Amino acid sequence: MCGKCCRVATASVGYEELLKLSNEGDTSAKEFLDTFEPYPSLEDALNADEATVKNIPDWENRTFYHCKHIKPDSNLCPKYEERFDVCRTFPTSPWAVTPPGCGFEGWLFLEREMHKKRIRQLKEEKIYYQAKLKTNITNKEKGLYEKLIKQIDARINLYDKYGSKDW
Ligand code: SF4
C-alpha cells in the first residue's frame, strides 16, 4: 500500500518495443500500456521516487512509467477489484526487484529460500544417483539413473541466472 510500484514501474523491453508488441496484439504489452504511461524523462522518474528508480538494475538506460489510475493524494488503487493482471500478479517471481522497504520483501525471501532448499535436495539426489552409477547395476537401472540426473540438471539450470550452481 505504499504505491511505489504503481508510481515507478519499468519493463524488460524499451517503450518502442512495447508499443510494437502491443500493436501486434501482445496482451501483456497492451495491458501494461493500458495501465502505465511513461515519464517524459528519466529526471521526472527520479523526481517521483529516486530510491525506487535507483534500486532497479541498469536504471540509467530504462524507461520508467507511472500508473494512469492511481490517485495523486492516495496510495490506494481506484481499480483494485478489477485491477489488471500485471498488477494482480506483481511480484511475479521471488527474484523480482521491488521498491526498498516493500511489504513483499519477507515473502520474496521465504520463496527464494524455498527454491534454494529444493535445489539443494535435488543436488543430494543427484549425488546419490551418481554413486549408484558406479555400482554393479543393470543397464535398465543405469538408463533410469542417467535420465534422473538429466532431469535434475535441467531443473537446476532453470535457476542458473539466480546462481543455482552455488546453492
Ligand atoms: S491499476 Fe491499481 S494496482 Fe495497478 S498500478 Fe494502478 S494503482 Fe497500482
Image: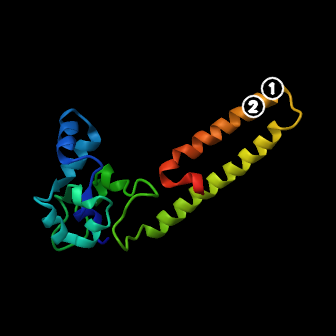
Distance Cα–Cα, label 1 vs label 2: 6 Å
Q: Is mark 1 within 8 Å of ligand 1?
A: no
At x 16%, y 62%, the residue is 42
Secondary-structure class at tag 1? helix
Secondary-structure class at tag 2? helix
Is residue 58 shown left or right of residue 123?
Answer: left
x, y percentage for residue 79?
Answer: 24, 58
Whether residue 148 is visible to the viewer of this picture, yes or no, is yes
At x 59%, y 56%, the residue is 166
At x 83%, y 38%, the residue is 134
Exactly how many numbered labels are in the figure?
2
x, y percentage for residue 69?
Answer: 18, 60
Is residue 139 shown left or right of residue 44?
Answer: right
Q: Are marks 1 and 2 in contact (CB under 8 Å)?
A: yes
Whether residue 79 is visible to the viewer of this picture, yes or no, is no
Q: Quadrant of the N terminus?
A: bottom left
x, y percentage for residue 32?
Answer: 24, 49
Q: Is residue 82 above or below residue 21?
A: below
> Dot 1 corresponds to which residue?
140
Is residue 98 shown left or right of residue 167?
Answer: left
> Dot 2 corresponds to which residue?
144
The kind of residue tagged 1 is: Lys
Extreme right residue here? Answer: 136
x, y percentage for residue 35?
Answer: 21, 52
Front residue (pair 4, 77): 4
The kind of residue tagged 2 is: Leu
Extreme top residue here? Answer: 139
Q: Quadrant of the C terminus?
A: bottom right
The part of the image, by quadrant, that contains residue 141 is top right
At x 35%, y 55%, the residue is 88
Q: Which mark is residue 80?
A: none
Q: Residues within 10 Å of mark 1 (few under 14, many from 20)?
A: few
